[in-house]
Image (cartoon, rainbow, N blue to C red):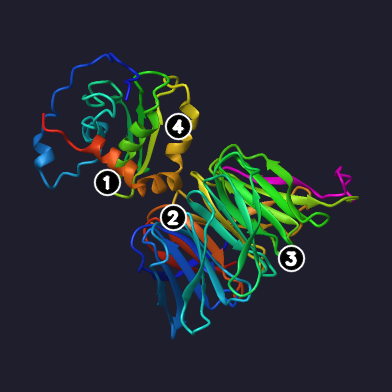
């Protein structure tokens, strides 16, 4: 298959999150924060390049919003090029990864960073339609591709 | 304010439960979901128990179930692109007919009032009307390609063979058979929602239709027949439908389902914010601009999205719901 974006800009990975003493203390309530969500999705592999979504700046810590009170998480992602045909697949991979990792009380929104994709509205609508997502996840070919994106490669 | 009291929680399904449907006699409930089963629940003593499990007919999620008006048949629609028709002629439920034709996920199935017609719809953008010929014979009477996107729901008018469909293309369409040439035609397209229309419900008379949407609103549509006293213009001697009421500011997320009780007139909604809400029309309400009040809003009705609600057809105030949380719940509403 021909690459759509032949030479993407590659960014540096951020350093690991330092573990604070209170996080190891079982008596301290540790709420979800954006960094925790970022750590879950930064390692997702790009479907086209042997790079992670973090290295391509498709996902960024600053574009994640966590509201523990209302149990909502919003992730904005930035396709590398405005006509990226993989945009839906990337969004689906992020959604599936979070569905599998987070407690079910969270309502997860995965949307395209406004203004960064030609079909932004159509992709967002598809990703927000849980019936379509549920059906997509029963598609054996598609779930294989998604699993390949989600699986942690040993670096 | 009214009160919605939980009567029973039925937990047997594994994974999200998508749809609930009452038997026309009101004494049995069919449910279906991601676990590829249809479950039939009935009351034994004081408890509702899972009497029957129907499996093996579908390879993927079962999205929707519907009882025939006679109560002898049950139809199940699945993401596997088929619709199974179950009957209990032998005493046990058996699948004797499978309807094939849709290209991909079937989202909804519904029997007409007479029981002679069956409608199905799919992500393939089409609505199919099936004629129930002889015993277990179903013939495709029409393939309606009016929608431009995924069709989410089909419902029949409570008295006549008028079909309504709701779609991802944000519209609702009304279909009827043209008796001069037996062709099914799209009579009207109802546009007003700003996003996917997920479900529909006619009132008892069929002269009003309620719709619910991803735009978080509920809308009430009213039929204006030719020569209506209000002077609303109609064309070709056909009724026209107008949106006479929009309920906004209540739901905070997608409204997945709506049920309009034919006994009490109450409207129940199933919402992605985990809440079941009940709406009641004001008695002095103007029929051309009706007022509906939210009389009950039950926080955490379920622990996840509520996918479906259905009023019992025999006992007023008796409501069933189901959710992504895997449970089916039975409720009683009192004023």
The residue that mark 4 highlights is A123
* Drawn side of residue B179 relative to residue B66, left or right: right
Q: Which chain carries label 2?
A: B
Q: Mark 4 lies on which chain?
A: A
Q: Do the residues labelled 1 and 4 touch (CB within 8 Å)?
A: no
Q: Is residue B240 magenta?
A: yes
> Callout 4: 10 Å neighbours few (<14), some, many (20+)?
some
Question: Same chain for marks 4 and 3?
Answer: no
Q: Do the residues labelled 4 and 3 touch (CB within 8 Å)?
A: no
* Drawn side of residue B44 relative to residue A60, left or right: right
Question: Same chain for marks 1 and 4?
Answer: yes
Mark whose residue sits in front, 1 or 4: 4
Q: Residue B312 location in percent, x, y?
A: 57, 70
Mark whose residue sits in front, 2 or 1: 2
Mark whose residue sits in front, 2 or 4: 2
Question: Same chain for marks 3 and 1?
Answer: no
Q: Do the residues labelled 2 and 1 touch (CB within 8 Å)?
A: no
Q: Residue B60 location in percent, x, y?
A: 39, 57
Instruction: Name the secondary structure under disc 4.
Output: helix
Quadrant location, the N terminus of chain B: bottom right
**Which residue is nearer to you in this view: B219 or B51?**
B51
Query: What numbered label is drawn on residue B159?
Result: 3
Region rendered in magenta? B229-249
Q: Residue at x 83, y 49 (%)?
A: B238
Q: Are marks 2 and 4 in contact (CB under 8 Å)?
A: no
State whether residue A131 appears in this view.
Answer: yes
Q: Which chain carries label 1?
A: A
Question: Same chain for marks 3 and 2?
Answer: yes
> Callout 1: 10 Å neighbours few (<14), some, many (20+)?
few
Q: Which of marks 3 and 2 is nearer the N terminus?
A: 2
């Amino acid at each position: 298959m021909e690459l759509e974006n032949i030479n993407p800009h590659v960014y540096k990975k951020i350093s690991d999150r330092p573990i604070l003493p209170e996080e190891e203390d079982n008596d301290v309530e540790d709420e979800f924060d954006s960094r925790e969500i970022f750590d879950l999705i930064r390692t997702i592999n790009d479907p086209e390049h042997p790079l992670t979504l973090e290295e391509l700046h498709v996902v960024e810590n600053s574009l994640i919003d966590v509201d523990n009170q209302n149990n909502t998480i919003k992730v904005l992602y930035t396709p590398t090029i405005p006509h990226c045909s993989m945009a839906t697949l990337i969004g689906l991979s992020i959604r599936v990864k979070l569905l599998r990792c987070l407690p079910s009380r969270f309502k997860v929104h995965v949307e395209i960073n406004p203004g960064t994709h030609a079909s932004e509205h159509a992709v967002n609508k598809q990703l927000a339609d849980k019936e379509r997502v549920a059906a997509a996840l029963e598609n054996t070919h598609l779930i294989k591709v998604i699993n390949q994106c989600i699986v942690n490669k040993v670096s | 304010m009214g009160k919605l009291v939980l009567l029973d929680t039925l937990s047997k399904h594994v994974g999200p439960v998508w749809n609930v449907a009452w038997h026309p006699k009101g004494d049995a409930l069919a449910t279906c979901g991601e676990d590829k089963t249809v479950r039939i629940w009935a009351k034994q003593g004081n408890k509702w128990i899972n009497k029957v499990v129907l499996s093996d007919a579908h390879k993927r999620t079962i999205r929707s179930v519907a009882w025939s008006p006679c109560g002898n048949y049950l139809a199940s629609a699945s993401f596997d692109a088929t619709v199974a028709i179950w009957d209990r002629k032998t005493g046990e439920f058996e699948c004797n007919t499978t309807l094939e034709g849709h290209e991909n996920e079937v989202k909804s199935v519904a029997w007409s009032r007479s029981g002679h017609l069956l409608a199905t719809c799919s992500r393939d953008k089409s609505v199919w009307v099936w004629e129930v010929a002889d015993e277990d014979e179903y013939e495709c009477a029409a393939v309606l390609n009016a929608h431009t996107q995924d069709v989410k729901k089909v419902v029949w008018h409570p008295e006549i063979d008028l079909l309504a469909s709701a779609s991802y293309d944000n519209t609702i369409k009304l279909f009827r058979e043209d008796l001069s040439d037996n062709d099914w035609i799209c009579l009207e397209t109802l546009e007003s929602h700003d996003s996917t229309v997920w479900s529909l419900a006619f009132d008892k008379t069929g002269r009003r239709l309620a719709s619910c949407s991803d735009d978080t609103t509920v809308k009430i549509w009213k039929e204006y027949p030719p020569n209506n006293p209000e002077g609303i213009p109609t064309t070709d001697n056909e009724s026209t439908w107008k949106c006479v009421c929009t309920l906004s500011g209540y739901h905070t997320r997608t409204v997945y389902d709506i049920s309009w009780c034919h006994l009490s007139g109450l409207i129940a909604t199933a919402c992605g914010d985990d809440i079941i809400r009940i709406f009641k029309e004001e008695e002095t309400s103007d029929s051309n601009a009706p007022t509906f009040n939210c009389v009950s809003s039950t926080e955490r009705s379920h622990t996840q999205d509520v996918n479906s609600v259905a009023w019992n057809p025999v006992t007023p105030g008796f409501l069933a719901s189901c959710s992504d949380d895997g449970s089916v719940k039975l409720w009683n509403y009192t004023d």
